Amino acid sequence: MHESSLVEFTLNAVEDKAASMNIKKVTLIHLTCGKMRGAIPQLMNEAFRLLTPARPMFHGAVLEMEETPIIAKCRACNSQHEIEEFHDITCPACGGKEYDIISGEELRIDYFEGE
Ligand SMILES: [Zn+2]
């Protein structure tokens, strides 16, 4: 499952950070995940539930995930638009086919809480 590796990655990163801050128990993790990552929030939570029992630091912790849309910027006319499907993108303003992705690829731990 793709989501488990994203959750694993998140837990490792938070664990390192928490340890360096002398936090023994994490209660909440807030993630921002771009839609291009293809992570489904429900599956993320499921992976979180499956992976945390082996890690006492995260017992009882909650995972919050915010999805950011995929935004493409047209190279021809510079207009920006949100895209749903990642194939065959045509600029709605000028019909251009070349674009840069400016949002939607991120995976970021915004913050976490603990004690
Ligand atoms: Zn355009």
Image (cartoon, grey):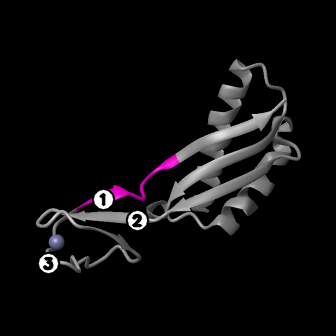
- The image shows residue 63, relative to residue 114, as above or below, that is below
Residue behind mark 1: 101
Give the residue displayed 54% in from the left and 55% down from the top.
Answer: 33
Q: CA distance from mark 2 to mark 3?
A: 19 Å
Q: Position of residue 86 (x, y in %)?
A: 35, 73
- Front disc: 2 or 3: 3
Q: Position of residue 13 (x, y in %)?
A: 62, 34
Residue behind mark 3: 94
Q: Quadrant of the C terminus?
A: top right
Q: Are marks 1 and 2 in contact (CB under 8 Å)?
A: yes
- The image shows residue 114, relative to residue 109, as above or below, that is above
Q: Amino acid at mark 2?
A: Ile
- The image shows residue 55, relative to residue 95, as above or below, that is above
Q: Nearer the viewer, residue 107 or 56?
A: 107
Give the residue displayed 88% in from the left and 47% down from the top.
Answer: 60
- For disc 1, the neighbor class at 10 Å (few under 14, some 14 to 19, many from 20) is some
Mark 3 Cβ and ligand 1 under 8 Å apart:
yes
**Magenta extent:** 100-107
Q: Quadrant of the N terminus?
A: bottom right
Between discs 1 and 3, the one toward the N terminus: 3
Task: Name the secondary structure under disc 2.
Answer: strand
Mark 1 Cβ and ligand 1 under 8 Å apart:
no
Number of dots carrying numbers? 3
Q: Amino acid at mark 1?
A: Ile
**Would you identify the image quadrant in which residue 102 lies?**
bottom left
Q: CA distance from mark 1 to mark 3?
A: 17 Å
Between discs 2 and 3, the one toward the N terminus: 2
